[in-house]
Amino acid sequence: MNRRTFLFSSAGVVGANDRIRVGLIGSGGRGQYLTANFKELGAEMAAVCDVYEPHLEAGLKAASTGARAFRNYKQLLEDRGLDAVIVATPDHWHAQMAIDAVRAGKDVYLEKPMAHNIQEGFRLVEAVRQTRRVLQVGMQRRSSELFTQAREVVKSGALGDVRLINSWWYNTKAAVRTAPLPGKLDWDQWLGPAPKAPFTPARFSDWIYFWDYGGGLLTGQGAHIVDAFHILMGSTYPAAVTASAGRVSVAGAEVPETTCLAIEYPENYLAVFTCGYKAMRYAFVSDQLKQINGSKARLDVGRERYTLYPESSAIELKPSIQKHLPGIFELSSREHIRNFLECVRSRKEPNAPVEVGQHTNVVLGMAVESLRTGRRLRWDAAGKRIQ
């Protein structure tokens, strides 16, 4: 069967024996990482797009399949030979590129967070459902066996009533980039939907620390942590969100690196996420943790392990369940991509569909608004807006 043979009219279904042809939009470090994994799982990386020449060259080298080079993503989307695209650009481009991709008939693997604000997230949900394309948000814990198992522990009732989750992500960041940027960059294209601003090396290389392009690690790492709450507790949209921060301590940044996010959920529990990027360095598998505090037990969930501590009067708590799955974090990323490719063939829902991405996007959008206004914000679920 030729890969261009479509079985279901406009659905664009890939045959079981056909190789899925993928285009990459945004070939920085994350894009190159995804390229390697997509290739390892049998996809053909047939096109690469980037507005920064060194990244484009590195992306083509990573594809190593005679991939076509593009400097404008809309031209890449015109390639009818592509079945899917990866969007691995800065956050402010995520939603618009994904909307354009599904409307061009492509399935999409979209890096988190799904959007840069709440309303563009809802526009993306609408576009995906109207076009009936497959969209997987890159929140790989949705494909992790560790989180599947931990979720079953919560569902078993072993924790009792849960009213509080504490979580954190600690690391360090010294300063944003000030060194000159080598190579050619199309700055106007890079800005795209963002407000016009003069080029600086920091705005390009450390874009996440500038409000126009990201929300700092509050949203960058928070996307994973908030989605973990939703996985473990079965939650969707919040009831209310409050965020606070210390003064900016990363030289040259706009967005604070030390933040605290409190999320009130309709299920009557409070989830607190503390992000500290002026802390000591931790081992990769120990830099983050979620502690679900129940009336009968506490469940600790990290990157590659989870532990259940039953209530006890002993000075040192002893676990009743202790699971360590070495390497599961890296494997989860691979399984998330595998799930996406399988869904491109089957047309089934992926593990992290667009609505799941929007549940987290709403929390993050409210967090940024709360941080910038100093207000506790409530969510109007019926009106799909902040109250």
Image (tube, rainbow, N blue to C red):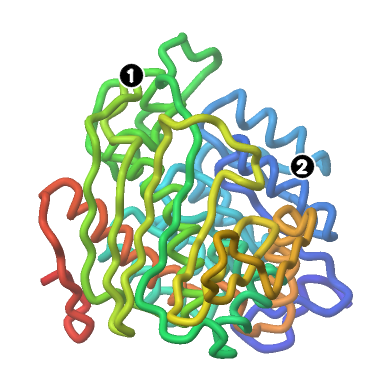
Q: Position of residue 386 (x, y in %)?
A: 16, 69
Which of the numbered marks, if any, corresponds to residue 182? none
When asked about the image quadrant of residue 140, the answer is bottom right
Residue 280 vs residue 92, the one in the foreground: 280
Q: Position of residue 90 (x, y in %)?
A: 44, 42
Say which amino acid is labelled 2: Ala
> Where 175 falls versus 369 (above or below)?
above
For the N terminus, give its image quadrant. bottom right
Q: Position of residue 325 (x, y in %)?
A: 78, 61
Q: Secondary structure at mark 1?
A: loop
Say which amino acid is labelled 1: Ala
> Where 267 falls versus 319 (above or below)?
below
When asked about the image quadrant of residue 247, the answer is top left
Mark 2 burial class by Cα count in 10 Å: few <14, some 14-19, many 20+: many
Residue 351 vs residue 272, the one in the foreground: 272
Q: Is residue 81 visible?
A: no
Q: Which residue is located at x 55 percent, y 56 percent?
A: 77
C-alpha separation, residue under disc 2 versus residue under disc 1: 36 Å
Q: Which residue is located at x 79 percent, y 55 percent?
A: 326
Q: Mark 1 highlights which residue? A: 251
> Where 239 falls versus 324 (above or below)?
below
Q: Mark 2 highlights which residue? A: 63
Q: Which residue is located at x 23 percent, y 82 percent?
A: 381
